[in-house]
Image (tube, rainbow, N blue to C red):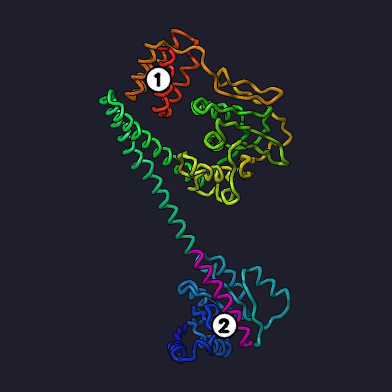
Amino acid sequence: MVCWSPNSALSKFLRFLKHPKAMTQFHFSTSAICPGKLLIIDDVPENIGVLFNLLSGEGYEILIAEEGGSGLQTAINEQPDVILLDVMMPDMDGFEVCRRLKQNPLTQDVPVIFLTALTHMEHRLSGFRLGAVDYITKPIQHEEVSARVRTHSNLRRLQREQAMHIAQLQERNAELDAFAHTVAHDLKNPLGIISGLSHRLCQHYSQEAELLDNLQDIRNSAEKMREIIDALLLLARVSKQHLEPQILDMNLVMQQVMQRLQPMLAERQAQVRFPAAWPQVYGQPQWIEEVWMNYLTNGLKYGGTPPYLEIGAAQEGEQACFWVKDQGPGLSLEAQEKIFTPFTRLRQHSGEEGHGLGLSIVERIIAKLSGRVGVESQEGQGSRFFFTLPSVAQAAPIAVQLHQAPHCLTAKEAPVVVAPQAYKTVPTHTDLQQLIAAARMGDILWLQEILEQLCLQDQTLKAFCQEVTGLAQDMRIKQLRMLLEKYAQQTQA
């Protein structure tokens, strides 16, 4: 084996660059300079000499093997960028050498260029089937050899860079996993302490209204931080998790969604219109529940005062489309282009708080389920947020059925309107004062005990107690106090 390093050629090139007119005389590009390591496997010294003189002058480090066996060992030990391989050699011909190179994991990615006087198409195809990337026919043409070697040397370099970038991405993904672990454990625990201590302070200072409001703000902020952390973890989980889609029971999914939204529906006096039937689709129940929650929550926040939302569903070829349409102020074209980007907030001027992750999570979920998301909107004319899912072939639509509360009617043949109900029966003034005291202290367990006793005493209070329970579980303490105080004023009057 002969190893040659072209220091003299490099020195000449450096001296050339020092010339004042060098950069105008030489059109410099990275594709023109391809220093690398080449292995020549050939049993004819004259061929080796021609290739050595030509390629060493272009800056390559040259490795030489005069028969197939030593060439294989040199390739394993030195890991060249390109191998120039003669076909006609004694003992082991070039085809066999190539076959063994491609079987070895250490050399299978090294590009092999055959050198041969054989010009028949069958010989060329045999080489390509074995994994060769190119052919150079004899007698050798200098410009052809230079161009082909440069091309495959560049491709090999790019291949290695790509492998390096993939390794870096894998390392960063591992770091993100570690970050998610840190978020889940090291950040949520301190938030729990903040929430717990503020709860104790609320109990201690239950008679000081202004201080109590500040403490409730601390608790609400801690809860908001927890929601952001949970959203980030869900976003990371959706990106990584592999799942097998299943046939969705959209009625069951919507049942869970409406149950979670009851306090917000009541607070905002919202109306929600449902379709008559659901197309049958493939999906993942928990993830689609989050999609509906994000769309409907945004609709309740930005869909008008009071909000009026229309939920729709329709078959569209091999996919079914679902949507939430509102009567809000609409979105500009610029906002529509950015709305599904992480940390882009809806209607920042509206006064509603948000972390800008919800719709980006929706997009990730639906893309994972082989669907798509989008928004159609005009300023001043509301918005229609939609998502699609793969349909179950030839499956009949399923009638919409909702069993949430007395005001949630079942859809049969026509769409229905769901709206919060004004309660005809409320607790007595004394009971309300007890509920207000529990709310001021932030004692949710005490509050629930009172509500359970009220339901046992009078079943007509069940709907009222469900609303209060929902606000308490969602930590909407200020809204809960305002609601209870409003009813207390009515009973006192």
From the image, tell me which residue sits under label 2: 42
User: Would residue 169 be visible to someone looking at this image?
Assistant: yes
Relative to 397, is 284 on the left or the right?
A: left
Q: Residue 309 or 210: which is nearer the viewer? A: 210
Q: Is residue 370 visible?
A: no
The amino acid on which the numbered mark 1 sits, given as a three-letter code, is: Glu
Residue 357, horizontal then vertical, whole percent? 49, 44
Q: Give the residue at x 51% y 81%.
A: 33
Q: Is residue 161 magenta?
A: yes
Residue matched to label 1: 485
- Residue type highlighted by circle 2: Asp
Q: Residue at x 46, y 39 (%)?
A: 351
Query: SS of the residue at dot 1?
Result: helix
Depicted 493 relative to depicted 399: above or below: above
Work out how far the residue at label 2 is from the one at label 1, CA to CA, in angstroms.
96 Å
**Quadrant location of the C terminus in the rendered image:** top left
Residue extending farthest top: 457
Q: Position of residue 382 (x, y in %)?
A: 61, 39
Q: Is residue 447 left or right of residue 255?
A: left
Residue farthest toward the left in the current orientation of the protein: 204
> Which residue is painted at 53% across and 70% down in the image?
158
* Image location of residue 286, percent across then percent down: 53, 34
Secondary element under disc 2, as helix, strand or loop, is loop
Q: Is residue 351 magenta?
A: no
Tell me the magenta residue range. 140-163
| Horizontal arrangement in the rendering, residue 208 relative to residue 290 (left or right) | left
- In this view, the residue in front, 82 or 273, is 273
- Occupied quadrant, residue 99: bottom right
Magenta span dominant secondary structure: helix
